[in-house]
Each structure stands twice: as C-alpha cells, then as structure tokens.
C-alpha cells in the first residue's frame, strides 16, 4: 500500500514507534524556530534542563512579537536572546527582520525537512513541503537540545482541490472554507494534506496562507506537495539547490477526504469571534468598517502586498477607514520599496507599520470602542485586538483592500479584476539583520531585571484537594488564559508578574481567588486551550497553585504544555458531569499520583458528587507528569 505525503515525511524522520495513526512516535527534528514571546522562557528552560548544544541542522530565534519597547523590558529580552544565541550557536533574527514564519519560509524552509517551532503557526512551512509542527517553547527547547520530538501520529485528512480560483477569490477563502466545514476542533488529532489539480494553480505564498491557518483547525500540521511552484519559489530565493519533489503515492489512504471546487468558491470572511464563524462577503456588504489591517504571518507576503498595492494605485482609502499594512519581512518591504509599490500604498492613505506581528497580537492599533475591524490575520478571538467590544472580521487581502476603499465589507470583484503578480526572478536577499551562529561558550548571557529565573514548582501532593477556581465555557483560547497585548506580553519572561493576568478575560477575580485558596483546579469545556502555543497559559496557573484542569476535551498543544508544566489534564469520563460543577465547589482527587502510577480508574469528589475522570496520556507523558513536569524530568533523566 502506498503512503500519503504526511506518512512519507514522518516515516523519513521516525526515530521511535510506528507511523500508524494514534500511535506514539518520536521524530527527528531538523530545524527549530523560537520567537521572542515564547523564546525567552524556552531559553531559560533550556538552561534549567542543563542542555548545552543544539542537536539540529539549524535553529533560529526571531524577535518579532515584542518589538514595541514601551519600557526597557522588551529591549532587555532582546539582548538576553541575542547573547543566548551567541553562546549556544543559534541564528538570531534581529527586530525588524520580519515575522518568524515569513522569514523562515524565505530563508530556511526546505521541502522534506522537519521543523518544530514555538509558535502555533509554525505549520506555515508545510506550504513548502515541510513537516512543520507547532509546540510549546519547552518542547522546542527539548527538541533543540536532544534532536527529537514526541507526538501522537496524526490521522490524515485529504483536501482535494479542483478547478481554479475565480476573480476576487484567494487562498484565504480556501482555508476559510475548510474552517467552515471542519470547525476549530475539526483538525485535532489530524494532519491536513492538500492534493488535486487545484494545487498546481497555487503559489508557495498562497499555500503558506492555507497551511498557516491549519493551526486554527487544531491540526498537528498541514502540508502541500513540493513541485514546480516550490522550485520557482526557491529559485527566487536563490536556494534552488534545496529543491526536492515530494508527493503522495497514487494509492495512498486517508482518514477522510473533503473536496473543494475552487471555481465555485466565493469571497468569505470569518465573523466575530471565531475563525470558523465563516460567512460569504455578499451577506455582509452592509457592515461599515472602521479599520482594515493587512499583514500577519498569514497574509503579508510579497504577492499579497503587491496585489494590495496594485489595487491601491491611484485610488484613495475611504475617509472612515484607517488602513494599516505590516509587511511580513524586510525582504518584502525592500521589494515594495524598490519597485514603487510602497509609494502607491502610502499615497492611497495606508499607514505602514513595522515588519512584525503588531496588531495581530494586540500590540498597537487597537480599534475604537465597539469598532469594526477587518483584518487579513488568522485569529479574531474576542479582545485579542486590545479593544474589549471590538468586532473583528478575518478576510483575504483582496477583500481587505476593497473594503478599505469602499468603507463597507466589499469583494474585490466589485472594484476591479484581481491583479496577477509574478515573483521576481530573484529577490534582493539580504541577511544583514540575521546573525549567523558562531557559538562561544564564554559569552556572558545578559539578563535584565525583568527576566526572572524559570520557577521550579513544589512537589505534586499525592492527594489533590482544593476548590474549583473557575468553570469556563467551550473553546476557551490561550488568549483568554494568558492574554497577549503590549502591556502583558512584555512580562513573558516574568511568570510571577504575568500570573496576575491569568484568566482575567474569563473572570477578573481569578488570580485573587487562586491566591486566596492557595491554588485549586480549573474546570473547562470542549477544546480547552485552543489557539496559541504559549506555555505561559500553563506556567501562570501552576505558579498560582493549579495542579489539575478537568475539561470536556483539550487542544493538542495546550494539553502538552499542561503536562510539561506538571498540571494533570483530566477529562470528564461523562461530559454531562461538567454541568453540575460550580465555582468554589470543594474538589478532592484522592491518591491521584498512585492511581495514575498503577493505571487505576480515577475519580474526583466535586461538590459532594462522585465524578469519574479520564487521563489520556502516553506512557512518556505519564512519566513527565509524575516527575512534576518536563524540566524536572529532563534534569533527573538527562
Ligand atoms: C499568537 O498568534 O497567538 C502568537 C502570539 O503568535 C502565539 C505565540 C505566543 O503566544 O507567543 C502562537 O500563535 O503560538
Ligand atoms: Fe505573529 Fe500573529 Fe502570526 Fe502569531 S499569528 S506569529 S502574533 S503574526
């Protein structure tokens, strides 16, 4: 029997286990990606685990999230990261060089290679035929130090693309259609593989938009074949020698297949407050928009911004709209500056921002009160923009630029034909904001006062007792658990301070309640912890004394982060029991540790009821939990 592309990529990296869906495997990691918002903590953990040398082909650390520098904290973190890279031999991408996923695609992405990144949108690399997976910073630190990563072999969903996109439609509409059909939970436990004749009509940039937002499906990764489009992209980057063709076998099998006729797609948007709340643009044309933001790791490539510039040329944005454009990388910005496209944007009234995440993570450009913002980003979770009552819609660049001109949600078909953009034969490749590895073990790592050592937590008690500190609803995101935004993000290397913001978006009293009762447990609904890979959403709760979360189900990355932090991710054996739990109920889980060790059934007493629980973890994860988290585990076992 033949193999699908995901199976091929995994088999060629397998170091433990069998590439059969559901089984526990370990894979070799060729490349790692860290970004500043998770990287500082990951570096502290790398040191705390006693690791000393990257075992990967290449490891890169990007400064792209925390670049606002409203105080000394971010700049201190940058220096810490730069000196860490120097000491241990990592590439360091300086602030201003661009958003990690865009720069990685341009400079390091390579078909057939594996990449583990401490950012949930690392699967962007799948657009280049990579096995690219997102994880928490700690998992990336371990992969960097040991060269391998453990995961559950995903099942594979095939998305068969037929036909070709019509005028006004874009790659973003393809992934929005997939989200509409599968929802934000639909990819959990799966990888998504794109196939069919429609694939060859999509450039690497368009493919990367699609694989990027596979994160919103909860999928382990998404991947496209490596073909003539891949070669063309690598040529433009001066890296054609790294091309290899990759495709699934004809008789490959899939867990399921969904087919999308590209010719029948219409422009779509994700309405507030979830990327799967997808609606046709045609239904929303009455909505007046205050702000349009073009950028983020989903839609800030050369092709995206050139299309925007062509449409803006000689036109003026609507007086009621503020249009921001954040180029994905310095390479993109340089190309736009050189060919004059930047001038068209500026003259049309666009506000040009730095090549960083910026508004996507609530760092600047918060909309006005109850403002409507249409963004080419990947997440529109409530409050993520920085304005509590803002209404954020997600769309393609085509729809965004048309909307900026009209002032209401508009399809580009109503303004002009979609401009066709060709890649330059060769981009101007300049790596002068990339510091190449040149390890020097004598380098002093400079730690600013905001950088607190990685906290080592207390031993897990044999019997877990306490209060239910909060009961959340379904689909709670890590943005709820540990908010982004400039005010909070600059404390990413300071868990004690950060813990004061923990879960305040669900319950402003959460940190106080946790302190008052000396910790306790969190109760969650379905898909608890979806979204970002930030392990701070586990480290802050554990700092506040939370040692178990009981939920109906968990998202993949957050569950791994809980385990790494020594928090038990327990599930209701009967999801209906969730309904009877109330805030401040007494909870006890007697003999938790010994029962887990002996594989005995688990149950909790919650508010006088007996509630059967499940712990679905691998034998390795069980050991990590029993050791009190990954840092202790690695320290003890090497
Ligand atoms: C995000 O988009 O939410 C982030 C900020 O890039 C996160 C990473 C982080 O929280 O540091 C992600 O996607 O994993
Ligand atoms: Fe940055 Fe936004 Fe992409 Fe996260 S989703 S990496 S914040 S641009």
Image: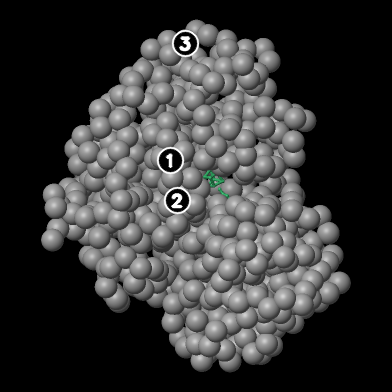
Classify mark 1: helix, strand or loop. Answer: helix
* Label 2, residues with CA under 10 Å away: few <14, some 14-19, many ≥20: some
Q: Residue 323 lies in what quarter of the image?
A: top right
70 up-or-down from 522: above or below: above
Residue at horizontal 51 percent and vertical 68 percent from the top: 560
Q: Residue 583 lies in what quarter of the image?
A: bottom right
Instruction: Quickly name the residue at label 1.
Output: 181
**Rendered-image quarter of ligand 2:** top right
Between residue 418 and residue 391, name the one nearer to us: 391
Instruction: Quickly name the residue at label 3.
Output: 414
Image coordinates of residue 638 in percent, x first then y, are 45, 86
Between residue 102 and residue 620, name the one nearer to us: 620
Image coordinates of residue 612 in percent, x first then y, are 61, 77
Check the image and tell me how it is coloured: one colour
Query: Nearer the observer, disc 1 or disc 3?
Result: 1
Instruction: Quickly name the residue at label 2.
Output: 186
Left or right: 2, with 341 as reference point: left
Circle nearer the N terminus (3, 2): 2
* Disc 2 + disc 1, Cβ < 8 Å: yes
Residue at horizontal 34 percent and vertical 24 percent from the top: 264
Callout 2: CB less than 8 Å from ligand 1: no
Cα separation, mark 3 vs mark 2, equals 33 Å
Cα separation, mark 1 vs mark 3, equals 26 Å
Cα separation, mark 2 vs mark 1, equals 8 Å
């Amino acid at each position: 029997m033949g193999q699908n592309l995901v199976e091929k990529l995994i088999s060629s990296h397998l170091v433990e286990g069998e590439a059969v869906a559901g089984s526990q495997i370990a894979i070799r990691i060729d490349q790692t990606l860290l970004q500043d918002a998770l990287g500082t903590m990951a570096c502290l953990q790398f040191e705390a685990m006693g690791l000393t040398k990257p075992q990967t082909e290449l490891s890169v650390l990007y400064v792209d999230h925390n670049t606002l520098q409203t105080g000394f904290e971010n700049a201190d973190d940058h220096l810490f990261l730069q000196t860490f890279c120097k000491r241990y031999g990592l590439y360091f991408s300086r602030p201003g060089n661009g958003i990690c996923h865009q720069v990685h695609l341009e400079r390091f992405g390579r078909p057939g290679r594996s990449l583990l990144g401490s950012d949930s949108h690392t699967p962007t690399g799948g657009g280049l035929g990579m096995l690219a997976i997102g994880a928490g910073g700690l998992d990336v630190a371990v992969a960097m130090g040991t060269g391998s990563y453990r995961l559950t072999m995903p099942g594979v969903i095939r998305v068969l693309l037929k036909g070709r996109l019509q005028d006004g439609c874009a790659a973003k509409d393809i992934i929005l259609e997939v989200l509409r059909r599968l929802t934000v939970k639909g990819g959990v436990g799966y990888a998504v593989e794109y196939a069919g004749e429609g694939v060859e009509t999509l450039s690497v940039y368009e493919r990367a938009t699609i694989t990027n937002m596979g994160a919103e499906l909860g999928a382990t990764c998404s991947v496209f074949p490596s073909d003539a489009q891949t070669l063309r992209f690598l040529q433009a980057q001066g890296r054609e020698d790294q091309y290899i063709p990759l495709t699934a076998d004809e008789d490959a099998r899939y867990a399921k297949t969904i087919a999308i006729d590209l010719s029948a797609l219409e422009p779509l948007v994700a309405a507030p407050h979830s990327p799967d709340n997808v609606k046709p643009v045609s239904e929303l044309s009455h909505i007046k928009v205050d702000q349009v933001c073009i950028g983020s790791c989903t839609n800030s490539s050369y092709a995206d911004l050139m299309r925007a510039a062509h449409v803006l040329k000689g036109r003026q944005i609507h007086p009621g709209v503020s249009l921001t454009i954040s180029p994905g990388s310095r390479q993109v910005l340089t190309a736009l500056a050189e060919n004059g496209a930047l001038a068209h944007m500026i003259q049309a009234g666009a506000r040009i921002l730095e090549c960083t995440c910026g508004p996507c993570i609530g760092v600047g450009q918060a909309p006005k009160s109850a403002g409507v913002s249409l963004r080419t980003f990947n997440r529109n979770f409530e409050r993520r923009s920085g304005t509590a009552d803002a209404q954020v819609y997600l769309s393609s660049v085509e729809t965004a630029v048309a909307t900026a001109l009209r002032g209401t949600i508009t399809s580009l078909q109503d303004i002009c034909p979609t401009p066709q953009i060709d890649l330059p034969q060769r981009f101007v490749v300049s790596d002068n904001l990339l510091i190449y590895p040149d390890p020097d073990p004598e380098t002093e790592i400079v730690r600013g006062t905001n950088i607190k050592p990685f906290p080592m937590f207390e031993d897990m008690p044999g019997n877990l007792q306490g209060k239910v500190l909060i009961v959340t609803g379904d689909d709670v995101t890590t943005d709820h658990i540990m908010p982004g935004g400039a005010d909070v993000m600059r404390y990413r290397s300071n868990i004690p301070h950060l813990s004061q913001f923990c879960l305040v978006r669900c319950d402003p009293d959460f940190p106080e309640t946790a302190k008052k009762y000396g910790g306790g447990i969190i109760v969650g609904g379905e898909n608890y912890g979806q979204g970002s890979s930030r392990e701070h959403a586990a480290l802050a709760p554990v700092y506040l004394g939370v040692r178990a979360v009981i939920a109906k189900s968990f998202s993949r990355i957050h569950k791994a982060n809980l385990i790494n932090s020594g928090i038990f991710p327990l599930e209701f054996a009967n999801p209906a029991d969730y309904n009877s739990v109330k805030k401040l109920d007494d909870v006890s889980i007697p003999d938790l540790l010994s029962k887990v060790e002996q594989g005995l059934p688990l149950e909790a007493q919650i508010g006088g009821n007996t509630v059967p629980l499940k712990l679905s973890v691998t034998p390795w994860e069980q050991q990590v939990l029993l050791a009190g988290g990954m840092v202790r585990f690695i320290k003890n076992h090497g």
